[in-house]
């Protein structure tokens, strides 16, 4: 079966289907209230036991703070008022499911209508708890990813970042999904975990069965169900070859990133969590070119406080020591939802109230994040980066706020880096077109090709019907990239690329020719990109770029580039 290979490698193992369960039921009248109350109490006990175990694992795999969220769920479900009211409803003849659900819904309604974010978040907690307890009452067994046995291939309709957080890397040999693409966040996480993954495989949940053997070819984007002997042997060999090539890349470890004619480049990593900074170093990255701070917000049940954020940013800075750390301010909206922020449903979320737009209008949240970043800047080589910039005013407003907060910290006698750099993501068509104006306002650019491709081609990165248009090798996107790099160079500011295209071997000679100065890629791609860069001289890259920029279609560009790479 064909899909999109989003994380390279070959995995061979047994399928584990993660089904979505419906929590629907028919309420019934109960005659034996005592028995029903016991059934309810038993479910609560099991819920607490399971949640405690989850919290224990989370403490080890994710962190103490996240584990506390789970413990909060236990206190919630043990609330004497809630339990008392459910019992009363059962005494009145309702079944445990209906009694518990109606009490939860009442709390959800009260909490959701509150004005402050913290109380609103309680509604999301109650929703989680409601689903967990109802699942137990209805006898729905949720499969726990963290407990999947060795040699498991996960098969799921949609892989969420929270599922990825539960994955035990030693046991999961492959991931197959019905939705998602190379740039979806769960794909990015799969690459960091180095698990072969194929996404957007139509109807895989219907075709696959639990326990069936499967081959996941994350390089070609193929999934083979119940392979025969010959296929198993063929892919076994391919896996060996892939692992051997990976081994060969090791000779680039610890070496500087230079082209064949000796020009040096910065080769840094994209991360989502402070601990990934260690991963970046482990893979020989030279720092961090993009810290996606959304994950810190996604993993919580309410907006992290200044202190909490400060600790996380400081942690990443301390791991990296004097190596660069570019922290991108909150980039929510589009495909990145944070339920507790209660963003309204929009007709066109990718063009809606998101990223820098949201932050500039929610000053409290933005100030908290910027203060935390500024404070952490006393402990490392931190820069600030604003996402989704479309006009000069957004940069000016963001920078003015940074200045205001610097003054505040100065007055409070709190240390920070006075010279902290403030740059922007150039990832919209607007930013590409006014790159010359934006370069005068910014300390650096980072080209986000994941979004830039989408906004330039007017093609949603997650929509498979328009995926044929979504390519950074489209002549329009290449012209955007060239214009952005040229504007940066003319204004003497550094220009990097943190979109997925930065690690594409076909793109690399073009970027060298245009004059990119920094490549920010997923940690496992570092050595491959260093090797690619080392193959090109500026002269040869220019020759190729000149030919490519005269071509008229993405297909021609791909065909030509594959013939010379
Ligand atoms: C991009 O758009 O290229 C980018 C790096 O940001 P994200 O993928 O987080 O939107
Ligand atoms: Mg982006």
Image (cartoon, rainbow, N blue to C red):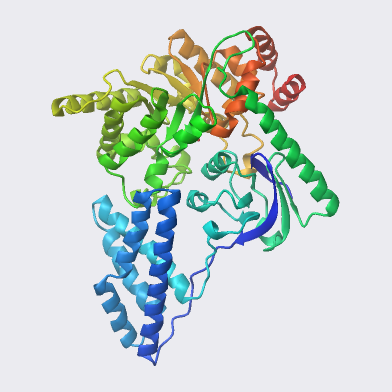
Indicate left or right for 207 with 291 as reference: right
Question: Is 174 in front, or is 176?
Answer: 174
Residue furthest to the left in view is 411
Q: Is residue 233 visible?
A: yes
Indicate the position of residue 502 as horizontal and vertical percent values. 57, 26
Indicate the position of residue 458 as horizontal and vertical percent values. 55, 34
Residue 319 sits in quarter: top left
Question: Is 61 in front, or is 217?
Answer: 61
Residue 564 sits in quarter: top right
Give the residue displayed 61% in from the left and 51% down from the top.
Answer: 172
Indicate left or right for 98 with 507 as reference: left
- Work out whether 27 lies above or below 484: below
Give the residue displayed 34% in from the left and 65% down from the top.
Answer: 74
Give the residue displayed 68% in from the left and 61% down from the top.
Answer: 206
Indicate the position of residue 478 as horizontal and vertical percent values. 60, 21
Residue 96 sits in quarter: bottom left
Question: Is 203 in front, or is 215?
Answer: 215
Q: Is residue 271 visible?
A: no
């Amino acid at each position: 079966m064909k899909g999109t290979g989003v994380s390279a490698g070959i995995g061979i193992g047994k399928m584990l289907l993660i089904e979505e369960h419906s929590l629907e039921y028919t309420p019934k009248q109960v005659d034996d209230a005592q028995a029903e109350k016991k059934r309810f109490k038993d479910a609560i006990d099991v819920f607490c036991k399971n949640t405690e175990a989850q919290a224990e694992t989370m403490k080890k795999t994710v962190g103490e703070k996240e584990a506390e969220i789970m413990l909060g769920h236990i206190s919630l479900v043990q609330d004497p008022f809630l339990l008392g009211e459910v019992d009363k409803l059962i005494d009145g003849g309702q079944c445990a499911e209906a009694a518990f659900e109606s009490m939860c819904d009442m709390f959800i309604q009260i909490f959701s209508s509150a004005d402050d974010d913290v109380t609103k978040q309680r509604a999301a907690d109650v929703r989680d708890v409601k689903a967990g307890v109802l699942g137990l009452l209805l006898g729905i067994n949720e499969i726990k990813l963290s407990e999947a046995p060795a040699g498991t291939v996960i098969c799921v309709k949609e892989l969420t970042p929270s599922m990825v957080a539960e994955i035990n890397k030693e046991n999961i040999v492959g991931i197959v999904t019905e939705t998602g693409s190379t740039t979806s966040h769960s794909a990015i996480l799969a690459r960091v975990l180095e698990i072969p993954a194929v996404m957007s495989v139509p109807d895989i949940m219907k075709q696959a069965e639990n326990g069936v053997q499967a081959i996941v070819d994350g390089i070609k984007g193929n999934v083979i169900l119940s392979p025969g002997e010959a296929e198993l042997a063929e892919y076994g060999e391919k896996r060996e070859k892939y692992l051997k090539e990976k081994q060969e890349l090791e000779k680039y470890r610890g070496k500087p990133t230079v082209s064949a004619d000796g020009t040096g480049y910065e080769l840094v990593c994209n991360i989502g969590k402070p601990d990934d900074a260690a991963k970046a170093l482990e893979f020989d990255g030279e720092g961090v070119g993009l810290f996606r701070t959304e994950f810190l917000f996604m993993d919580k049940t309410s907006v992290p406080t200044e202190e909490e954020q400060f600790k996380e940013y400081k942690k990443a800075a301390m791991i990296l020591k004097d190596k660069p750390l570019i922290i991108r301010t909150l980039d929510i909206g589009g495909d990145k939802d944070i339920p507790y922020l209660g963003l309204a449903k929009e007709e066109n979320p990718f063009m809606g109230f998101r990223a820098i737009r949201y932050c500039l209008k929610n000053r409290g949240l933005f100030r908290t994040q910027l203060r935390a970043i500024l404070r952490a800047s006393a402990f490392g080589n931190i820069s600030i980066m604003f996402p989704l910039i479309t006009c000069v005013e957004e940069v000016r407003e963001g920078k003015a706020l940074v200045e205001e907060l610097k003054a505040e910290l100065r007055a409070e006698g709190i240390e920070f880096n006075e010279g902290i750099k403030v740059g922007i993501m150039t990832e919209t068509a607007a930013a590409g077109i006014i790159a010359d104006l934006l370069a005068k306002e910014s300390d650096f650019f980072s080209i986000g090709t994941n979004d830039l491709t989408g906004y330039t081609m007017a093609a949603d990165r997650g929509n498979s019907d328009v995926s044929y248009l979504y390519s950074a090798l489209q002549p329009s996107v290449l012209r955007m990239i060239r214009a952005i790099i040229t504007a940066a160079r003319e204004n003497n500011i550094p220009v990097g690329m943190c979109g997925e295209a930065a690690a594409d071997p076909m793109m690399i000679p073009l970027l060298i020719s245009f004059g990119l100065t920094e490549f920010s890629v997923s940690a496992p791609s570092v050595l491959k990109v260093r090797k690619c860069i080392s193959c090109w001289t500026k002269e040869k890259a220019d020759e190729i770029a000149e030919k490519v920029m005269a071509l008229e279609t993405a297909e021609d560009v791909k065909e030509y580039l594959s013939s010379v790479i």
